Image: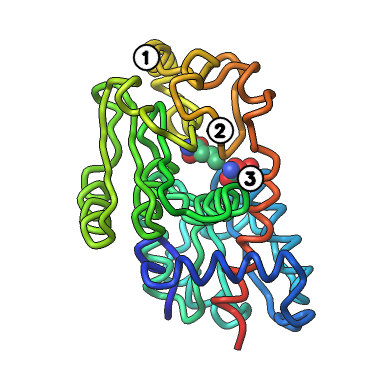
Amino acid sequence: MDSLLSICDIKEDVSYIIDLAIKIKSGETEEKPLAGKTLAMIFQKSSTRTRVSFDVGMYQLGGRGIFLSSSDLQMGRGEPISDTARVLSRFVDGIMIRAIEHDDVIELAKYSDVPVISGLTNLEHPCQVLADALTIKEHFGSFENKKICFVGDGNNVCNSLLLIAPLLGMDISVACPEGYEPNEKILKIANEFAKENSTEITVSDDINVALDNVDVVYTDVWVSMGDEDEKAQREKDLAPYQVNQKLMDIANDDAIFMHCLPAIRGQEVSAEVIDGPQSVIYDEAENRLHAQKAVLYYYLKD
Ligand code: CP
Ligand code: NVA
């Protein structure tokens, strides 16, 4: 069964899904295309946007979502992921999961007879970057000649951005300190995508180099869910990478600021930037709903 665990899984259809999201957002698609369909939503980690947008998205498409906290599921008491996948497949039409370990989501998809959609793992956050791409397309009109710079920790969001940018024809740079580089395997695949699409990827600890000719400045928290033990060290190492106005001024004059949220003002981003005129964070958050409806339509519609 086709699943969405990584942006690589929709390599050929990323543009199609974003255009579908634009259509769904503008009300051009049929009403209630997922009538009678059910989505199980398993959460092993906290969530505001992912949980609510999947739930509301299913409802607006005519179906329903069922919230399942992993601590309430038998899976949380040791029931094998394989049994959970096989059993849920008998009840529902799709499974969305936010998991601690990416490998657990691979395992779930392996035994599931219905599509599995990742709502974030330690490795990737594919639904987030679909919403981000939708936001960029809406703001600039197209992806042509656009460049994103991800500043800070080369984390799950950064990994998914590295994969989606070349597939849409955008350049991407990462500005991070040594030891906080994106996942090596992801970077290798992203570089292959960049080669195929004649785009550029750079990873540098030099913020000035990374921010040259940039249209989108993107950052995320320094301490992702699961990294709490390293909090003090991360805050020290990443402090020079705070996105503040001085740093925004290196990017293009019409550059926008993006953040997947939740954000910590005064850490990875200054309040002046995140609450300032270049910030599009609330459009970006709203687009989680529209992008996810496109993903749900793509995977669950008969
Ligand atoms: N951006 C994002 O995934 O937010 P939540 O953690 O609130 O779902
Ligand atoms: N990188 C963050 C994203 C939260 C949406 C985390 O994994 O906690």
- On whether ligand 2 comes within 8 Å of the CB at mark 1, the answer is no
Mark linked to residue 284: 3
Residue placed at 28% from the left, 60% from the top?
A: 197
Mark 2 vs 3: CB contact within 8 A: no
Res. 194 mark = none
Which residue, given by chain and number where applicable, does mark 2 sit on?
254
In percent of the image, x 35 and y 63: which residue is there? Answer: 8
Q: Residues within 10 Å of mark 2 (few under 14, many from 20)?
A: few
Q: CA distance from mark 2 to mark 1?
A: 34 Å
Q: x and y percent of residue 261 in the render?
A: 60, 36
Q: CA distance from mark 2 to mark 3?
A: 17 Å
Q: Secondary structure at mark 2?
A: loop
**Amino acid found under the numbered disc labelled 3:** Glu
Helix, strand or loop at mark 1: helix
> Mark 1: which amino acid?
Gln
Q: Quadrant of the C terminus?
A: bottom right
Disc nearer the start of the sequence (2/1): 1
85 to 207, vertically: above or below: below
Between the residue at mark 3 and the residue at mark 1, the CA separation in whole angstroms equals 30 Å
Residue name at image x 59 percent, y 79 percent: 300
Q: Position of residue 193 (x, y in %)?
A: 27, 58
- Amino acid type, residue under disc 2 in the picture: Asp
